[in-house]
Image: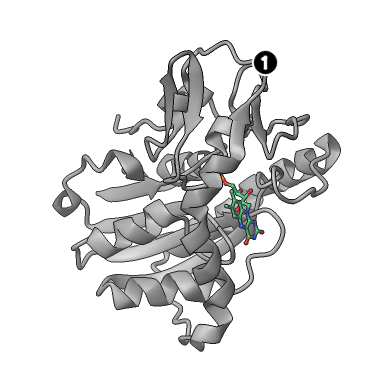
Amino acid sequence: MNGIFYFSGTGNSLWLAKKVKESLGGEIRYIPNRNSDISAYDKLIIVCPVYSFGLPLPVFDFMKELNSDAPLWIVMNYGGAAGKAASFAYNHAKSCGLNIKNVYTMKMPENFTAVFSTPLIKPYNKGLLKKAPKAIGKIIASIERNEEKAFPSDSPEKHKLYNENKSNWGKMGERFSTSSACTLCGKCVNNCPAENIAIKDGKVIFGNNCVVCQACYHRCPSKAVQYLGKPNKMPYFNPNVPEKEMGTDIVS
Ligand SMILES: Cc1cc2nc3c(=O)[nH]c(=O)nc-3n(C[C@H](O)[C@H](O)[C@H](O)COP(=O)(O)O)c2cc1C
């Protein structure tokens, strides 16, 4: 059976994971839940976003703990440019002793808009979402054919940005805050995969263990979560996936 492991802040990777399951079958597991028996799977597929031309921290760490010799495929999605993300992921998998077969990258709507102002315009995203089924379809067909591709390792210099950013992500949590629109509904607390958000004395507190997934920022029902005090005018969540499925395992 296929084990499809995803990490996602704004639904793009969950949507892709569901497409993989639809075509190839298997069980979908949310990586931060850490509740599956890996030995139940004979093929592993990780689906996640590109972060700083590399891997999100929860995925990076999951791969270090993933003690399995089952063949592994990685499907990454990015908002602007993937850079060396595929070779980074491939070689990280190798260094973790995993049986990595291939890594794919494809474009989806950008969600790092708290930091970078990108063309988060509705028609642009609509176009990307329209092309996405074809792009993931090609990747699924390649996985189905068990296609393999080796990525030579890069010099550490090529991944300097990733390593620098990765060590700063935790602290970025403290740059988030809530505006007066906050109703203390607790959704940001529940959606945070790093347990980095709490409500204390009637205030939302952001800690320094952030994994920068943007779930709190984009999925606040009152648009109250801000980055560096700047309001979030255009929250994004993949419109083709039910938000209530985020963070869940889909096994049936
Ligand atoms: C911390 C962070 C870093 C990112 N780095 C990159 C990057 O290096 N290149 C890129 O094209 N997109 C980058 N993105 C955008 C995401 O990869 C992209 O929007 C992805 O589709 C989000 O997937 P999700 O909805 O499953 O969370 C980054 C997003 C975040 C939150």
Quadrant (top left/top right/bottom left/bottom right) for the C terminus: top left
Q: Image point 42% across, 20% down: which residue?
A: 200
Q: Secondary structure at mark 1?
A: loop
Residue 134, relative to residue 125: is it above or below?
below
Q: Image point 71% across, 34% down: which residue?
A: 229
Front-lying residue, 43 or 58: 58
Residue 205, relative to residue 203: is it above or below?
below
Residue 145, relative to residue 204: is it above or below?
below
Residue 60 shown left or right of residue 170 in the figure: left
Front-lying residue, 56 or 29: 56
**Residue 249 appears at what percent x and percent y?**
33, 33
Residue at the disc numbered 1: 180
Q: Image point 82% across, 35% down: which residue?
A: 122
Give the colour scheme of this rendering.
Answer: one colour
Amino acid type, callout 1: Ser
Residue 60, relative to residue 112: is it above or below?
below
